[in-house]
């Protein structure tokens, strides 16, 4: 029997989307293991194909979202995540996980700060795929919807030109169709140069089924399939990328 | 020894001050927030600075201002408030918990005070305007505060 | 805080064997002195209670310690013992008297038990645990609990709401051997956000807008961080809530059925996990430590408690992991009364010893009773087998929560507490159950009368002002601040429609590991109760159940909760309104076969303003949970298509009382609609059959604002225009156009069906109030309501929607 690739989900105090994200990963074919940060060692990632930083409020998001999680991760395992990436591993950060990946310097330089509205925002958004070759997005149409739920999702860069360059280079693999939170260039998701590290504010794991959509009559239209949600296709894309590169 | 760092956001524009109030004022005032960390410590000043820059500051989106002088100028007044002794300050707890986990930080924190500052800009008729901000922002059940009039 | 004043009663009677506790010589005190002592120690015990305590100690031939008195005060408190719901009440209605011996037993407990008996295997646990459980499927059960946190929220809205939600989440974690929280609800009653500051009759009261902002952010920051979707809620505004806002928080949970039963047996270890214990949980009651040592009063410690959701999240992760590993014998939360209640409950029958020296403290210097009754947040107490301790410690390390061994159970039946080598409390809890029964008087006199039906001069303007009313406007600005989709299971969300901003009735979540789903809804109608509390009680149960059924739930598997908020129970009329409400919810529950599985009451919700006391109207929140057998049955409230038929289920009466329309038009004392339980429930069962057969596209309950608002809200989905003719709907002969458009007769649903299914549906409802009402269309995007040939309302839906959508947004 073919061995299923293993995905590790890192859980910090306050991480709270680990269960549904693990469920989504299992559904597309991964074996998953949730590792609380207290138990994380450099050796924990041996034999692992994908590391996921799920959503939530690591350390309460106090000081700044993702900051303390970054510091504690570096305390625990130093540069292990970078080495993991360099050795061909995949990394996915969703919402708080995106904030942590950004803080860790695993994504193009930027910072996720308070939404322009000054509010927490929980609603669905339209997204545009800006990088057709991203291993995380291959099965998704050019435009689709995911839900968001965050207070600090506004991506800023030191200068506006940097964000523009991300948009042009495809590093900004995912953008909001409409103005959502004040993100420079309406950036919703970033990838690194390898394409194997991807972070996004929206929550694909909350849209695995068509029935998860707010409109009961929504259908994806992908491959004539009616019951799947757009999130499924993100995880499916990822799974196929991981298995084909193994 | 004490070091004071006041941190302001580079990308957050001044907002409509009426958002802070229960009843709007006609003056068209605006406001900005900053966070002020007062660190009482023994040990290496440079280590404190390193800690502040690594832990409390986001180098892309924020700037820091060291010392007593207010970080922002030209306000009509500012309200400085924070959790009073005995009231749980979650950010402070999170920072101290992390600090305690650092091997050999190079300094000892004796006390950390976190204060929010709200700088209000615009023309105000008199000093009573700031009372309205205090009334609607601060709560004596958990906060203590001070108001500094004029800061030009 | 100076203690140099005249000697207190405590100083006179205290014997101080050690500096951490006292023995209080109460056996020779008279009633007035006992009451003085109770007041001084803030025990909230009446003279009768204190005399009863004195009798108990005379029987034991000894004097109590301060710790023991505090424990008894907690055990007998309104909060824990529901003294008013257990009181003997002389109740007079319109001149006729009756005696009610315990509202709780008569109308809640006995009624529910009869329903349990008629539905064997449905309710798996009720009234004795932290939350009641109903069976979901063969493997899992679900539970729901709601609480109020009114007074703390009035003082500090953010912290009050924060700890309110944190507390009810712990109730779920402490239900059975630990249930997993899967959804929260919140219901708030405030003064109107546009209240002018000059109108407020008291200083030191937080303005309603500040109250609303603070409370919403408090719920947001706790619920979102805990990763529990906040899926259901309601808002009410009334001037009487300016001074005493109501903040209801509720949480639902799921548990494997095998983990519901729990028992403490001898030789188990009692452990605490989560936060540390401090003076912060004493709510300012630090008088006594000051009396012990006049230098130790700590004014600064009197801050309001603030919740720490991450502390609770870590404890929650621990409890659920420990439960799954089978390491928990008993678990309960630390709420009111702190360790004294939690350990008291655990050791009530088994008995055991708690050593306060083991308790991890936030600060030094707490005396025995402070440690034992401190209500510091985020603590759970467990009973475990000694051999499980190492594995539990590993889990605590893994999830970074603190585990403390407090003591052990011993089978003695005695609750013993030691501190610094001395026994500071030794109580046989079985002696403490019979708190004196209070005797109260209540009365109610009919306040309503038949009024002449008002003439409608401009129905469109009436509809517009209803859609802009705070009672009806969209809660969207609040809902958006809550994560209502975390856990990835929220199928029916609080907002729906083509652009995800149209209203929904019930909310529905999937349950991992089950084919079945849970629905949740709330109903609160304080305006009705001002003049007809019986009608309010009946309609609240009806509305809650109707919303659950509309969403696809089985009407025969619904359980509900009653949460009361009352002003002054010593006021006969306020208590009378309560009795009438309780009678109504009991009658409704019995008729619908929907048992109460948990409930809570909050009294003394009044405030002394400069113009005298202002009480809240008797307010009942009915919240309910239902079971949906199949995801295909889930039905939303939004119009879905442009070629479907609209039909109405239920009868429209002439009464306008209690309606938002009546309040706007100042029709005081108009008759309030009553609920016809039998007819309503027959309709709900038929609806369920129709929905299972796939005949229903959408269904929206008719509630605040009446039929016109219901239709408008359905159309807010943005999918079609509506053409409706009211001339053929089932109604009473005397129901005028105002009642048809804006009356709030209960038990009505507007359903959307495909044209080809209308006949089947009509056949099903043969003999019941049912009629086709109109159609949806793509020809225009108006709400067009006519009466025969007369046009009542014809207006673009967009225009109406913007009023509704922005009504609150401009203030929030």
Image (spheres, coloured by chain):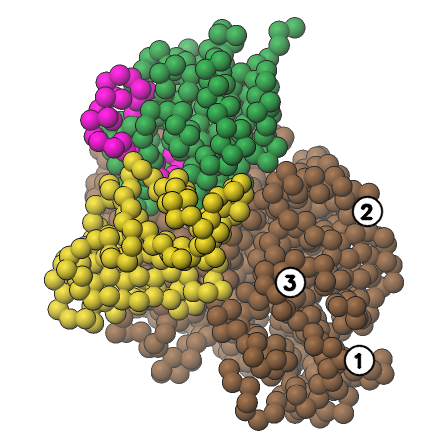
Chain colours: A green, B yellow, C brown
The residue drawn where x is 46% and y is 21% is A82
Is label 2 in a helix, a strand or a loop? Answer: helix
- Start and end of the magenta stretch? A147-175
Q: Which residue is mark 2?
A: C386
The residue drawn where x is 76% and y is 62% is C355
Q: Against A170, is C11 above or below?
A: below
Instruction: Please check the rendered image and state whether residue A164 is part of the magenta-colored stretch, yes or no.
Output: yes
Callout 1: few (<14), some (14-19), or many (20+) C-alpha neighbours within 10 Å?
some
Residue C809: x, y in percent? 28, 50
* Mark 3 or mark 1: whose residue is earlier in sequence: 1
Q: Which residue is mark 3?
A: C338
Q: Which sits in the foreground, C433 or C732?
A: C433
On residue C56, which mark appears? 1
Residue A133: x, y in percent? 35, 11
Is label 1 in a helix, a strand or a loop? Answer: helix
The residue drawn where x is 56% and y is 49% is C311
Q: Quadrant of residue A102?
A: top left
* Mark 2 or mark 3: whose residue is earlier in sequence: 3
The residue drawn where x is 57% and y is 93% is C6
Mark 3, chain letter? C
- Of tags 2 and 1, which is closer to the observer? 2
Question: From mark 3 to mark 1, how far is it between C-alphas?
Answer: 24 Å
Quarter that holds the C terminus of chain C: bottom left
Q: Against B125, is C290 above or below?
A: below
Contact between marks 2 and 1 (CB within 8 A): the answer is no
Q: Which sits in the foreground, A104 or A61?
A: A104
């Amino acid at each position: 029997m073919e061995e299923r690739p293993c995905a590790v989900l890192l859980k910090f105090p306050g991480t709270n989307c680990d269960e549904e994200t693990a469920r989504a990963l299992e559904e597309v074919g991964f074996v998953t293991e949730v590792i609380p940060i207290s138990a994380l060692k450099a050796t924990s990632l041996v034999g692992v194909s994908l590391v996921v930083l799920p959503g939530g409020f690591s350390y309460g998001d106090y000081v700044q979202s993702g900051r303390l999680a970054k510091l504690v991760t570096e305390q625990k395992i130093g540069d292990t995540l970078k080495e993991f990436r360099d050795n061909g591993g995949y990394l996915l950060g969703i919402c708080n996980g995106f904030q942590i990946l950004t803080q860790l310097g695993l994504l193009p330089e930027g910072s996720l700060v308070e939404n322009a509205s000054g509010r927490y925002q929980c609603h669905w958004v339209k997204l545009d795929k800006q990088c057709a070759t991203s291993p995380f997005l291959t099965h998704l149409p050019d435009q689709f919807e995911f839900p968001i739920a965050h207070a600090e999702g506004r991506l800023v860069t030191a200068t506006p030109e940097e964000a523009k360059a991300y948009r042009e280079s495809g590093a900004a693999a995912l953008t909001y169709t409409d103005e959502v939170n004040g993100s420079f260039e309406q950036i919703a998701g970033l990838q690194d140069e390898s394409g194997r590290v991807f972070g996004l504010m929206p929550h694909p794991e909350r849209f695995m089924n068509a029935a998860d959509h707010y409109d009961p009559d929504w259908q994806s239209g992908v491959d004539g399939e009616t019951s799947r949600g757009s999130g499924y296709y993100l995880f499916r894309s990822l799974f196929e990328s991981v298995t084909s590169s193994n | 020894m004490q070091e004071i760092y006041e941190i302001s956001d580079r990308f957050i524009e001044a907002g409509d001050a009426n958002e802070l109030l229960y009843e709007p004022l006609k003056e068209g005032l605006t406001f900005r927030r900053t966070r002020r960390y007062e660190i009482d410590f023994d040990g290496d000043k440079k280590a404190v600075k390193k800690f502040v820059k690594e832990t409390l500051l986001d180098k892309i989106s924020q700037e820091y201002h060291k010392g007593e002088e207010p970080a922002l100028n030209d306000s009509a007044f500012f309200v400085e408030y924070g959790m009073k002794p005995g009231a749980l300050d979650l950010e402070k707890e999170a920072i101290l918990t992390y600090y305690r986990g650092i091997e050999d930080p190079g300094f000892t924190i004796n006390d950390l005070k976190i204060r929010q500052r709200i700088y209000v800009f615009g023309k105000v008729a008199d000093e009573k305007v700031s009372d309205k901000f205090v009334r609607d922002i601060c709560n004596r059940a958990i906060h203590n505060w001070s108001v500094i009039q004029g800061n030009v | 805080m100076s203690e140099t004043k005249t000697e207190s009663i405590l100083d006179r009677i205290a014997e101080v064997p050690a500096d951490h506790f006292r023995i209080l010589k109460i056996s020779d005190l008279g009633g007035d002195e006992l009451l003085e002592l109770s007041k001084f120690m803030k025990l909230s015990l009446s003279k009768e209670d204190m005399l009863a305590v004195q009798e108990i100690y005379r029987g034991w031939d000894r004097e109590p310690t301060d710790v023991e008195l505090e424990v008894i005060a907690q055990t007998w408190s309104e909060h824990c013992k529901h003294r008013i719901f257990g009181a003997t009440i002389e109740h007079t209605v319109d001149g006729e008297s009756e005696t009610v011996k315990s509202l709780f037993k008569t109308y809640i407990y006995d009624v529910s038990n009869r329903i349990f008996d008629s539905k064997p295997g449905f309710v798996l646990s009720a009234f004795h645990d932290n939350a009641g459980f109903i069976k979901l499927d063969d493997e899992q059960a679900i539970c729901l609990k709601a609480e109020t946190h009114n007074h703390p929220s009035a003082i500090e809205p953010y912290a009050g709401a924060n700890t309110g939600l944190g507390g009810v989440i712990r109730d779920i974690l402490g239900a059975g051997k630990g249930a997993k929280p899967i959804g929260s609800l919140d219901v708030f009653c405030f003064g109107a956000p546009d209240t002018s500051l000059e109108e407020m009759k008291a200083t030191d009261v937080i303005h309603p807008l500040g109250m609303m902002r603070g409370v919403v952010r408090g719920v947001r920051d706790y619920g979102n961080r805990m990763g529990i979707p906040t899926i259901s809620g309601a808002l009410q505004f009334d001037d009487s809530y300016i001074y005493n806002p109501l903040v209801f928080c509720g949480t639902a949970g799921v548990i494997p059925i095998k983990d519901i039963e729990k028992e403490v047996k001898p030789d188990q270890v009692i452990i605490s996990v989560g936060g540390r214990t401090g003076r912060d949980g004493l709510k300012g009651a630090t008088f006594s430590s000051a009396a012990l040592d006049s230098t130790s009063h700590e004014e600064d410690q009197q801050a309001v408690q603030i919740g720490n959701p991450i502390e609770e999240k870590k404890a929650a992760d621990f409890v659920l992991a420990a439960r799954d590993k089978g390491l928990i014998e008993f678990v309960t939360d630390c709420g009111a009364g702190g360790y004294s209640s939690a350990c008291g409950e655990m050791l009530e029958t088994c008995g055991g010893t708690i050593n306060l020296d083991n308790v991890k403290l936030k600060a030094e210097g707490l005396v025995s009773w402070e440690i034992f009754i401190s209500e510091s947040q985020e603590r759970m107490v467990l009973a475990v087998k000694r051999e499980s301790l190492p594995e539990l410690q590993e889990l605590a390390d893994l999830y970074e929560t603190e585990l403390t061994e407090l003591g052990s159970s011993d089978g003695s039946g005695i609750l013993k507490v030691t501190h610094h080598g001395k026994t500071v409390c030794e109580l046989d809890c079985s002696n403490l159950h019979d708190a004196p029964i209070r005797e109260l008087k209540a009365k109610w006199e009919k306040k309503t009368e038949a009024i002449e039906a008002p003439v409608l001069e401009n129905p469109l303007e009436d509809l517009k002002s209803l859609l802009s009313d705070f009672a009806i406007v969209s809660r969207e600005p609040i809902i958006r601040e809550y994560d209502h989709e975390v856990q990835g299971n929220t199928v029916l969300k609080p907002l729906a429609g083509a652009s995800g901003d149209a209203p929904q009735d019930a909310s529905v979540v999937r349950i991992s590991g089950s084919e079945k789903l849970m629905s949740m809804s709330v109903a609160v109608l304080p305006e009705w109760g001002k003049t007809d509390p019986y009608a309010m009680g009946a309609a609240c149960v009806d509305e809650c159940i109707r919303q659950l059924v509309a969403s696809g739930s089985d009407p025969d598997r619904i359980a509900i909760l009653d949460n009361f908020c009352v002003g002054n129970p010593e006021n006969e009329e306020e208590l009378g309104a309560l009795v009438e409400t309780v009678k109504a919810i009991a009658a409704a529950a019995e008729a619908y076969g929907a048992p109460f599985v948990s409930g809570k009451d909050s009294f003394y919700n009044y405030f002394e303003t400069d113009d005298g006391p202002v009480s809240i109207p008797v307010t009942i929140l009915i919240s309910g949970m239902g079971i949906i057998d199949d995801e295909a049955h889930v039905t939303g409230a939004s119009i879905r298509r442009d070629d479907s038929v609209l039909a109405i289920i239920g009868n429209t009466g002439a009464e306008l009382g209690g309606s938002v329309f009546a309040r706007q038009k100042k029709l005081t004392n108009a008759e309030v609609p009553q609920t016809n339980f039998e007819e309503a429930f027959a309709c709900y069962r038929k609806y369920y059959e129709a929905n299972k057969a796939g005949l229903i596209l959408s269904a929206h309950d008719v509630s605040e604002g009446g039929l016109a608002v219901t239709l408008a809200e359905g159309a807010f989905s943005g999918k079609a225009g509506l053409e409706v003719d009211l001339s053929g709907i089932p109604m009473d002969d005397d129901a005028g156009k105002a009642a048809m458009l804006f009356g709030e007769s209960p038990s009505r649903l507007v359903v959307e069906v495909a044209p080809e299914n209308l006949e089947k549906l009509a056949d099903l409802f043969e003999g019941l109030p049912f009629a086709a009402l109109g159609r949806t269309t793509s020809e225009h995007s108006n709400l067009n309501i006519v009466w025969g040939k007369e046009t009542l309302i014809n207006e673009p839906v967009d225009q109406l929607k913007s009023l509704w959508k922005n009504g609150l947004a401009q203030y929030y």
